Amino acid sequence: MSAAASPAVAQQFDRRVGAAVREGLAARPKRLPAWLFYDEAGSRLFDAITELPEYYLTRTERGILAAHAAAMIAQAAGDERLRARLRIVELGAGSADKTRLLLKAATDLQETVLYEPVDVSASALDEAKERIKREIAGVTVTPRVMDYTHGDGGRLHLGPVDCRERRLVLYIGSSIGNFEPQQAQQLLRRVRAGLETGDSFLLGVDLVKEDSILLPAYDDAAGVTAAFNRNLLLRLNRELDAEFDPHAFAHRAVWNPTESRIEMHLMSCAAQRVRVGALDLTMSFAAGESIHTENSYKYKPGQAEALLAETGFRSEATWTDTRGWFAVCLGRAE
Ligand code: AVJ
């Protein structure tokens, strides 16, 4: 039926999505990569998550930035006699909501600033650009559509800067949390390799805390996170001609203390077989079998600083909230 209605469409699925799904569902335990969450519907659901009462991350980090943006910018720019102009790059910028606090602080210090948000989503970048142009005078936005997570090996290509400028790379919002320790190291090394000595890197990490706080943040009462998790299956239905019944899978959030991470899973409520048309594949699920859809690593105090030190940065400052729930660390490329 759908093939008859749109014969071309079934052929035109995104190869990267197809390959990731084929590989992840062949693995035992089954898994799907977290970047698959962010199609248009998923990005909207994530924005809704950031406003949930249980999801403390966004508002906690925003509070830290609101209190310390000027100090962060001043630290990155360096001391007054040798102060350089900053050019700000943001990895995984998305809607760039919290970034506006830093951009405002930068224009307070140097009047104008170049801002280069990097994201895989062109539509998110366009929206961010329009909003920043409207709301903060003195910011020139140059969005770059790029997948900074999968790279051609060695270094992140950020393009040339004026020799009087220094880069400040932002990687906030606990985005690093999706990466296993080894992958996180690799990513930071690639960022470092794309920078010059004296450039800086601002990293936002979520910290370990009681699981009575962590778990509801990933399993909220309104069910938005469950919808975000299940949207993955709906995406496969839309893009890969799959036939998942999303309600035949339960949303699960689990705290794994050994790995220091929240895990999200989709658990098959019954034994079932599901066809994925575009891949010409039928998957079997046992009752209770789960698809591991996300890791969200929680850092111990000092751990983000250690990661920076291991990857070519001198850790210069850490800002946190009064409860010690979230940390923002500045590293200087050595
Ligand atoms: C975007 C990776 C920071 O891990 O908290 C939110 C994604 N997943 N709720 C996080 C997410 C479920 C989020 N990050």
Image: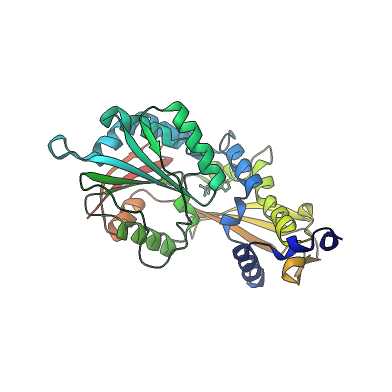
Residue 322 can be seen, yes or no: no
Q: Is residue 310 left or right of residue 207?
A: left
Picture coordinates of residue 18, whole percent (x, y): 65, 66
To which quarter of the image does residue 103 belong?
top left
Picture coordinates of residue 232, whole percent (x, y): 67, 54
Picture coordinates of residue 91, whole percent (x, y): 43, 49
Depth check: give the residue in front, 178 or 140: 140
Q: Quadrant of the C terminus?
A: bottom left
To which quarter of the image does residue 273 belong?
bottom right
Q: Quadrant of the N terminus?
A: bottom right
Q: Residue furthest right?
A: 1
Image point (35%, 62%), residue name: 155
Picture coordinates of residue 285, whole percent (x, y): 75, 67
Up/down of 194 relative to 173, above or below? below
Q: Residue furthest front?
A: 8
Image point (72%, 70%), residue name: 279
Image point (61%, 58%), residue name: 293
Depth check: give the residue in front, 214 or 308: 308
Depth check: give the residue in front, 259 or 158: 158
Up/down of 110 relative to 305, above or below? above
Up/down of 281 relative to 109, above or below? below
Q: Is residue 250 left or right of residue 183?
A: right
Up/down of 138 relative to 334, above or below? above
Residue 13 can be seen, yes or no: yes
